[in-house]
Image: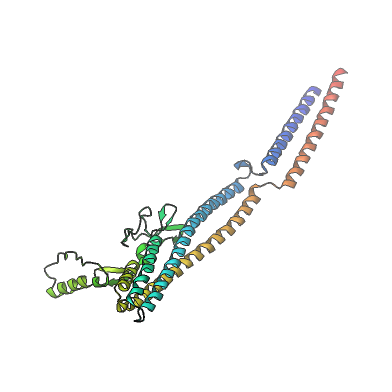
Amino acid sequence: MTRVSENSNSASLKFALDKTKEKLEDLQLKGTSLKKVRRPSDNPISNVEAMSIGSVLADNQQFLRNSEVALLHLNQTEQSLDQISDILLKAKDIAIQQSSDFYDQDIRKSISNDIIQMRNQLLAISNRRVGNKYIFSGFNTLKIPFDVDGNYTGDDGHIKLEISKDFLIQMNLTGKEVFFSDQLIAPDTIPGSELELDPPPEQDSDVTTRDLASNNSLDRKFHKRDNLFNQLTTLISALENNDPKLVQDLLEKFDSSISRIITLRTRVGSTVNTIMTTRSQIESENVDKEAHRSKLTDADVAELFSDINKQQQVLRTTYQAGKTILNQNLLDFLR
């Protein structure tokens, strides 16, 4: 009976020692990682919630990266619109001065060189890139949007990026939106242009002759949309040919173009403000989410090391108790 009791005591002591060691090792590992949840089984509910927060934070990081790309393009667009506006304002000022009969032909020819330089600047702006991507070419960002004659070779595509959950913003303006107006122009207002008419489309037999005549007349009078390059080219020609009347006729076009560029500039600025506000909200949410996840998974350092000291004390006490029991058993055996 005594031997059974001794074996039971030894087994209980070994079990207590093993459990104490296990707890101490677990606490020491937590002290190394400073995480109170090392395995999903430690706290399944907290672990699931922490994983959900991690997924939200990962999405938010992608949204922030998207907004950085959008801001980079929109800031370049905004700068380009400012420069275009400056060019048009200067061109308008020159047109106002040169629409007067006060200036002679030599002065106008000299000033036309300034307009040529301004047109070259406008062409450089129209083909501006961010990295290797053209900002005014629509979807086809690797294709140069304007040739030297000011012809648009891009498309009408609007690139959109998601900057928060289910919230997409447009990050580009196309070359058509920026450099072309909605106004159709007569070919005789474009110096050096030749009228190129497409063959009339095949018509159904029930289309009246009057309708055909009306459509053809419209096609002959207006064959292309007005654009900023044409306006500057026309101003150059008017100055070189000493034509103050044509210079004066351009003033209304410049006013319309300047107004349109200012409207686009306002739209881009509003989009930039929206992105900045959204970024601020996401960054604030990230701080809150990180703090909550930390509460779920991160160990309280002071509490953790206090628990380690307690377990070490328990282990020493258990060893001491085991030593006493073993000595007692040895004495009983010797008797």
Q: Which residue occupies 37% across, 56% down?
A: 139
User: What count of labels does the image hold?
Assistant: 0
Along the line of sight, the residue nearer the viewer: 188 or 201: 188
Q: Position of residue 191 (x, y in %)?
A: 27, 69
Q: Please give left or right for residue 7 compared with residue 256 in the image.
A: right
Q: Is residue 300 above or below residue 273?
A: above
Evaluate whether residue 165 shows in this view: no
Q: Position of residue 267 (x, y in %)?
A: 44, 68
On screen, residue 105 versus residue 331, left or right, reads left
Residue 119 screen position, x and y as percent? 37, 65
Depth check, front residue: 81 or 291: 81
Q: Is residue 270 above or below residue 290?
A: below
Residue 44 falls in image quadrant: top right
Q: Is residue 233 visible?
A: yes
Residue under the point 75% across and 30% down: 12
Q: How is the image coloured?
A: rainbow
Direction front: furthest residue: 106
Q: Residue furthest right?
A: 335
Q: Quadrant of the N terminus?
A: top right
The quadrant in which the C terminus is found is: top right
Residue 227, image x, y percentages: 33, 68
Q: What is the residue that sits farthest to the top in this orientation?
A: 334
